[in-house]
Image: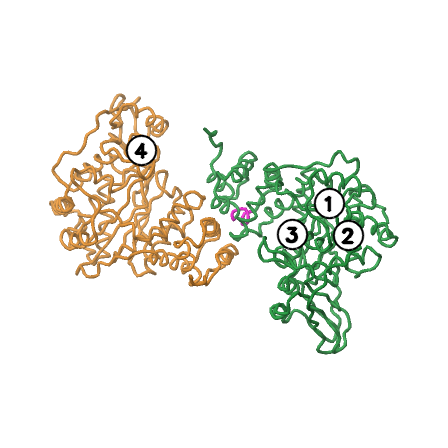
Chain colours: A orange, B green
Amino acid sequence: MSAPEPFDAVDVIRIKRDKGQVPEDALRWMVDAYTREYVADSQMAAFAMAVLLNGMTRDEIRVMTDAMIASGERMSFAGLGKPTVDKHSTGGVGDKITLPLAPLVASFGVAVPQLSGRGLGHTGGTLDKLESIPGWRAALSNDEITAQLRGVGAVICAAGTGLAPADKRLYALRDVTGTVEAIPLIASSIMSKKIAEGTGALVLDVKFGGGAFMRDVDMARELARTMVALGTDSGVATTALLTDMNTPLGLTIGNANEVRESVEVLAGGGPADIVELTVALAREMLTLAGQPDADVEKALQNGQAMDAWREMIRAQDGDPDAALPAPRETHTVLAPASGVLTRLDALPFGIAAWRLGAGRARAQDPVIHSAGIDLHARPGDEVQAGQPLFTLLADDDTRFGRALDALEGAWEIGADAPASTPLVLERITA
Amino acid sequence: MSAPEPFDAVDVIRIKRDKGQVPEDALRWMVDAYTREYVADSQMAAFAMAVLLNGMTRDEIRVMTDAMIASGERMSFAGLGKPTVDKHSTGGVGDKITLPLAPLVASFGVAVPQLSGRGLGHTGGTLDKLESIPGWRAALSNDEITAQLRGVGAVICAAGTGLAPADKRLYALRDVTGTVEAIPLIASSIMSKKIAEGTGALVLDVKFGGGAFMRDVDMARELARTMVALGTDSGVATTALLTDMNTPLGLTIGNANEVRESVEVLAGGGPADIVELTVALAREMLTLAGQPDADVEKALQNGQAMDAWREMIRAQDGDPDAALPAPRETHTVLAPASGVLTRLDALPFGIAAWRLGAGRARAQDPVIHSAGIDLHARPGDEVQAGQPLFTLLADDDTRFGRALDALEGAWEIGADAPASTPLVLERITA
């Protein structure tokens, strides 16, 4: 016979519904009982809606996160003998920053365990991008991860399914019940996985704008503050940058083309915005790792970061010198007039790349590594009539139509350059 | 292949979550799709919580109610050739008012279709009470109901399961998700069944206080106003009385003993509060039926109401002269001191009667018709030390212990009479 339950789900729901604070033991029970399927989806859905509308205190968010961590296994890199720092981005279009960033930071003797996911919807997945590299494998055992962190220092691999299983079930539920946008639940979802992964410190890239999960900068700021507080309360030193995601990052959106652009940055070149954000995040990570004065720009110029990249790719059976997959078909859009490119919107370009095959609609679908979009100009650039603006990449020319539909009205050529907006808007610390 | 769905549940949930008004077609779809099990329990639970916290407009409540009516069959008594008026009580302890009320009103040539439910929890069920009468049956066909309304005029019988099936599913969901207390959902739940039953007019007895579903008088008033507006908007003339349920109604709580007390009222006697409420509700019903000047008190005194009662019971195969079941065991509690009975709380007395076997814990359990509590004094009455205060009635003396536990602190003898409070606090009309 199973033990009697110490709480009743309806009582817990009512506390939050009536704007109260759920006691620690009751909240822990709620998450645990939901993982055991004793608390029903309908009950957790009502609770999630009450959280979305009535909020959670800082203490409640910490307990909720801790309970989700406790629902699964927890990794530890305490025995490595070097500091560990992780980075998490809330997701954007053309966001390949993890690729140059992890080896760059690791090249300073810091362990960077980047346990990542796959893309779903209009934002790409780090693992999908790296799988463009022939031979490279995403799945590593815990022993392989530890060995690679000890040696190369940087690991980008698939997060184990054993981490925070409560979060996995809750996330799927929120997706179908209109409760995704609850900041306490977003924060505990992200942070439970990151803390369970055993990182010692964490830098968050919280994006706002049309191509971001949080369109509104105030919501993004609140999420960033909530996660920084939560990391701090959970013993993980955490800093956040609030960054602009109205325009795609860099000149590539896809998989293989984003790897190519990342390698350009590691070779000391690449688009200015990618370099700027990579350097800014690397500085934050190295500051948390005790190296505030590390010369990260030099490490991009002198081959130090590139060496770490090549080691990291090889350690996971990838060939850093192999040719990347190329698209069978391309379709280039030309500037219809001369002027200044005033706008190029992240969300429709993300959707177009997805429709070209770079992303997946269902979790079980494959991605096409060569598919995506190469940009030839960025907002602020002068363009001449007839000059290439961007090129669609696909394996099948039947895909161009729906991609072009998504791009209708997604960019604009005008007379005056747009007002310049900072890429990194704010730095948020505990 | 089934037709594509015109709406998405997440979009509908989001509208209410963001304090918007759900368009009529979207709300109708939501209820219909939930009935078809296309919309999941978890989605409806999130929606119900958003309704509880953000409310619904008068229009939304009307549409929600209409959609629940449309989910099932709808009765009509338009062909009877006489007005129909129904009464609904939100439920209380010792509330047997329907029993004398229905024949009293019917005795004025009005049709009273009282389609009722069974008791669950601490409030009794009208059908359970009437089933104390040997031979009486609750289940009637629609043809039997119509014939009895045409003849006797009064019918108290089981509501068909085909009425508002969406409400049935939604009510069970609300019960386990902490969303029972949403006034728009309570109002649409009650009114969808009453309107589907085909009554021409409706009088609501909305109770407040410790033994009522709504403890708070302001909440009860809001519910009453919402239901009166809803009835009016749906073409059913509706009036509500706001009545006190801090003390049990009358001197009996149970089944057979409540029938006995009802017959006393029909014979021109009975406790003053039962007579007062029966008369007040009968006046409202007869006013809506076009007889504002009917002398209802006289009809209780001169046997007119009693004749209708006897006809009504016989029409459903009951014997109005048969002996009612008597309890095998009784336990009388005596006054420990002399003074005034200052307090006798409805909720614990309702729970005690339920534990004695008068009510059921699960829908499929039987009730014991002879079980319950007879009161020998009411708040305001002077009592002498050693005088009987109340008697517990059961078939099995092992039940007394837990019933007495419920009554701990549930009544009080003091020096001064309590302040008198009105039984009928307010009358609410459109």
Image spot of residue B194 (x, y percent): 67, 43
- Circle 2 residue: B319
> Residue type at mark 3?
Arg
Q: Tell me the crowding category of disc 4: few under 14, some 14 to 19, or many 20 or more residues within 10 angstroms, Cα based.
A: many
How much space separates mark 2 and mark 3, taking CA atoms?
A: 21 Å
Residue B53: say if magenta.
yes
Q: Is residue B159 left or right of residue B152?
A: left
Q: For residue A253, say whether it is visible.
A: no
Separation of marks 4 and 1 at Cα, in angstroms = 60 Å
Q: Which residues are magenta?
A: B49-54
Q: Mark 2 and mark 3, same subunit?
A: yes
Dot 3 crowding, Cα within 10 Å, few <14, some 14–19, many 20+: some
Q: Going 73% across and 45% down the picture, which residue do you hit?
A: B86
Q: For residue A395, say whether it is visible.
A: yes
Q: Chain of mark 1?
A: B
Residue B187 is left or right of residue A57, and the answer is right
Residue corresponding to mark 4: A354
Image: B417 above or below A93: below
Residue B118 disc label: 3
Q: Which residue is mark 1?
A: B86
Give the number of the mark in front: 4 or 1.
1
Q: CA distance from mark 3 to mark 4?
A: 57 Å
Q: Earlier in the sequence, mark 2 or mark 3?
A: 3
- Residue visible at 17% across and 53% down? A149
Which of pointers 1 and 3 lies earlier in the amino acid sequence? Answer: 1
Q: Looking at the image, is mark 2 or mark 1 nearer the viewer?
A: 2
In the foreground, A59 or A340:
A59
Q: Is residue B213 left or right of residue A211?
A: right
Percent x, y for residue A102? 20, 48
Given the image, what chain letter belongs to the residue carrying mark 2? B
Compute the Cα span from label 2 to label 4.
76 Å
Mark positioned earlier in the residue sequence (2 or 1): 1
